[in-house]
Image (cartoon, grey):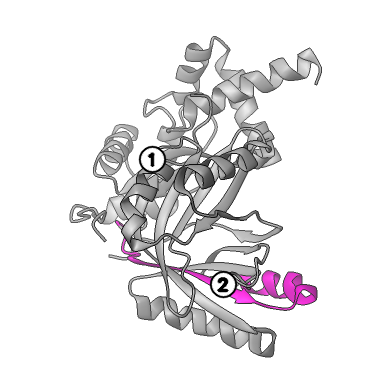
Amino acid sequence: MPEVVEARSIDAIDRAIIDRLQGDFPICEQPYAVAAAALGIEENELLARLQRLLETRVLTRFGPMFQVERMGGAFVLAAMRVPEADWDRVVSTVNALPEVAHNYRREGEKSSDFNMWFVLATELRDGIERTVKRIEEACGLPVYAFPKIREYFVEMKLRVRR
Amino acid sequence: MSAAVAADDELDRRLVMATQSGLPLVPRPYHQLGEQLGIPADEVMRRFRRMLDSGVIRRIGAVPNHYAIGYTANGMSVWDVPDERVDELGGRIGALDFVSHCYHRPRNPPAWPYNLFAMTHGSSRQEVLDKVARIAALLGADCRASDVLFSTKILKKTGLRIGG
């Protein structure tokens, strides 16, 4: 994967920061000082390390993770079957839309040929349908929306593997 | 929507916009946000706590790039299970410690027969496939068809962005 970042510089303290600060960041006057104390380091060291982990893209963000549905918006997974010859054009068309929050190429182990999977995030619920139509018109391909019917579990907390 | 509610929501919305790319990396981040938005820091903190309680904020903390921390194989496993069993099975699969997301989503036959989605991650495709095999074992005869879609390229990753 070309996006892999050189994580060469992750040391034990970085690892502890990543593993232990994926949630429960305090809401108080000096939250970094509180979090740093729990990790056994100084506030300024935590701030400097977070800065560096963000700059080297080991972290994609540090802050609140919002659930847009709880604010009246919508967050919907959608997929397309894109012919290889059309791939680049469709990627740029889809990625150009601000409503597209993530977009991944995926390849099925077995028979699935849905190769482009993206998440549409809109501030209003009816924005999804409009965005789906716009993508279909711009790309000339059908878009399959997979709105969640029920969420059984979501917790993206992964421990550092190196 | 009454004007009061709108104004109240508007302040939350401005807080979301101010922090969707991250919390300020300064000793007093909530104070800085208060100054930025022209409200007291206590009000910022109260609103953050409220948004956490109501689920508008799932959590506050570090969001690792999972490739950078060693998870180079990311598989979306998808399953066709009987609709009347999906809630029970989804609950059991979601409870597995290696599943990060688990959802019931609509089928779209014939192109897409699957109604249960579970994300798994690992350092290799084989590790992910082993985890997927454990899900298959748990589903047993309730699994009528399945597939695993591995992500092979991140085409875009900006996360939530509201308000231009």
Mark linked to residue A11: none
**Quarter residue A147 falls in:** bottom right
Question: Is residue B82 inside the magenta stretch?
Answer: yes
Residue at the spot 65% in from the left edge and 84% down from the top edge? B144
How packed mark 2 is, by other alpha carbons closer than 10 Å (few <14, some 14-19, many 20 or more), is: many
Q: Amino acid at mark 2?
A: Val
Residue B128 visible (yes or no): yes
Which one is in front in this view, the residue at disc 1 or the one at disc 2?
A: 2
Question: Is residue B87 inside the magenta stretch?
Answer: yes
Residue to which mark 1 is pinned: A36
Q: Is residue A86 above or below residue A45?
A: below
**What is the magenta range?**
B68-95
- Tell me whether the residue at label 1 lies in contact with that at label 2, contact meaning CB atoms closer than 8 angstroms: no
Element class at badge 2: strand
Q: Give the residue at the far top of this rendering.
A: B38
Q: CA distance from mark 1 to mark 2?
A: 40 Å
How packed mark 1 is, by other alpha carbons closer than 10 Å (few <14, some 14-19, many 20 or more), is: some
Residue A126 relative to residue B28: left or right: right
Q: Position of residue B2 (x, y in %)?
A: 81, 17
Mark linked to residue B78: 2
Residue B136 relative to residue B84: left or right: left
Q: Position of residue B57 (x, y in %)?
A: 60, 39
Element class at badge 1: helix
Residue at the spot 25% in from the left edge and 39% down from the top edge? A55
Q: Amino acid at mark 1?
A: Ala
Asked if marks 1 and 2 fall on the same chain, the answer is: no
Q: Is residue A24 above or below residue B109?
A: above
Residue B122 relative to residue B68: left or right: right
**Quarter residue A49 falls in:** top left
Q: Position of residue B113 (x, y in %)?
A: 63, 73
**Residue placed most toward the observer, A57 or A84:** A84
Task: Report the quarter where the N terminus of chain B lies.
Answer: top right
